Amino acid sequence: MKRRLFCILMLLGMLLMSAPVSRGLAAQSYTTGVINADGVAFRKGATTDSGRIRRLKKGTVVEVLSTNVNAEWHKVKYRDETGYVNRMYVTLQPDAGEDADYCGTVVNCKKDVNVRGAADKSGKLLGTAEKGESFTVTKPNAAEGWHEISYQGGKGYIAAEYLSLSRAGSSGQLASLQIDGGTLYPAFSPDVYGYVIEASSSKVTIKAEAVGKSKLSVGDTGKDSVSVSMPKSGSKTIRISVGGKVKYSLYIVRNVITVGTWNIKRGNGNLTAMGCLIEAQQPDLMGIQEVYRSRPKTGSVVDNLLSLRTKEMQNVSFAKTVSYAGGGEYGIGLLSAYDIESASATNLSSGGSEQRVLQKIVVKINGHRVSVYNTHFSYDSSATRAKQFVEVKKIMDADKNKYRILFGDFNAKASEFSVFRSGYTVLNDTNMKFYDYSASPISKSEIDNIIVSDNISVLNVRMLNDSLSDHKPIFAYLKLG
């Protein structure tokens, strides 16, 4: 009965949180970033030993020159200085194109900021702009550290660190999305159709504005705003319809464990966009398959895991399955927001050239030790996979920790997961149906999956329909007990 209820809830309750299919993240470029913490070091080189140019405060806008330098740094320009900032502390802003319309809201000040006649602190003072006031941005990043705005019938300039930019939408899109009682991830753009809201209070208020006079309904209310009561922990989903069609999905979470799994195909040339996608989902635990890393004595360092960790999820564990003559390594990895108490890897039966392993870390969540597993099964033999399923199940059953989570690319059909029907919940099975923001079904298989011990409550499950890898990431919201 519990299993059946879970499936029914999933069928009724899920739409995809995703960027539109017509504009995949794979084609995205990034030339602007925002510092997301206070006192972030701006260094001369891409190492922690490099001299510090200055410290940058939260909200500072920088020009991004190069991403993932040595896996951990973005090369940026601030004012007239060029240096490096740890990539975890730069939230990249996707480029919208030269024909995009922008608006800007005054932020990071106590009362107001100066508007000048030139993009320079010594430019003529035209007036002031109050905190929270919005302007049409006629030229983003008109000069290093400055945005050009429409001001009193002419042009004016506001320092970039005091102006938060957002995209103006087109017909059928939102013009704005305001959240009270929580934080929106990623920052609003009309072309982003799915968001996570980290609730910070017992009530979250969502207010939207549509472009033009399009009919707008937030949460099936027929109104442009809704207030959602949030318990001490949980997950709720709000849909926003524009012009009578569901366009946007907002996932509100409060004190839940957010987990995900993704086969990244060695980054597939899209590591920067992959990092942005993961950051936007705000996961606490992430299983990654097909990970590559190389640390040559000279030349650039490549490390897929370091290129994907976030400010909130910094702990990394790698399990090697292949060593290359040139010094590189290939395998699987785990990212964790929690301190890793222990890490290990156990060899599994492997019929092909690649040794398959079961990776394990132990973390403490709300006072409970949780075993987190990750694996990548053989693709060429169902008989070998059958052995691997039995071996993994035996290891997990013998685990003394009460709560267990398994991520993986299992290369398996739904029927092959039957060994986990007792004592566990398989989140992606044949009864599961995922939809994109326009209510169109997403083509999927059970290959990529998350399995949890049945003492873990599953609040929601989502699949993101992107083109960054040949696999689609899956995210879930969980609660212990």
Image: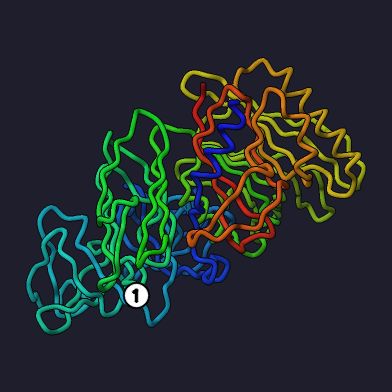
Residue type (three-letter) at the residue carrying disc 1:
Ser
* Disc 1 residue crowd, few under 14, some 14–19, many 20+, Cα 10 Å: few
Residue 274, image x, y percentages:
56, 57
Q: Residue drawn 14% across and 84% down?
A: 154
Residue 116, image x, y percentages:
14, 75
Q: Which residue is mark 1?
A: 171
Q: Residue drawn 82% across and 52% down?
A: 324
Determine the image quadrant of residue 62. Answer: bottom left
| 333 or 437, nearer to the observer | 437
Q: Residue drawn 55% across and 71% down?
A: 27
The residue sitting at the bottom extreme is: 154
Q: Residue drawn 58% across and 29% down?
A: 340
Above or below, comparing residue 244 to residue 413 in the picture = below
Decide if residue 436 is on the left or right side of residue 469.
left
- Quadrant in which the N terminus appears: top right
Residue 113, image x, y percentages:
13, 63
| 462 or 392, nearer to the observer | 462
Above or below, comparing residue 77 to residue 117 in the picture = above
| 208 or 72, nearer to the observer | 208
Q: Is residue 300 visible?
A: yes
Label 1 sits on a secondary structure element that is loop
Q: Is residue 146 visible?
A: no
Residue 9, image x, y percentages:
52, 38
Decide if residue 448 is on the left or right side of residue 140.
right
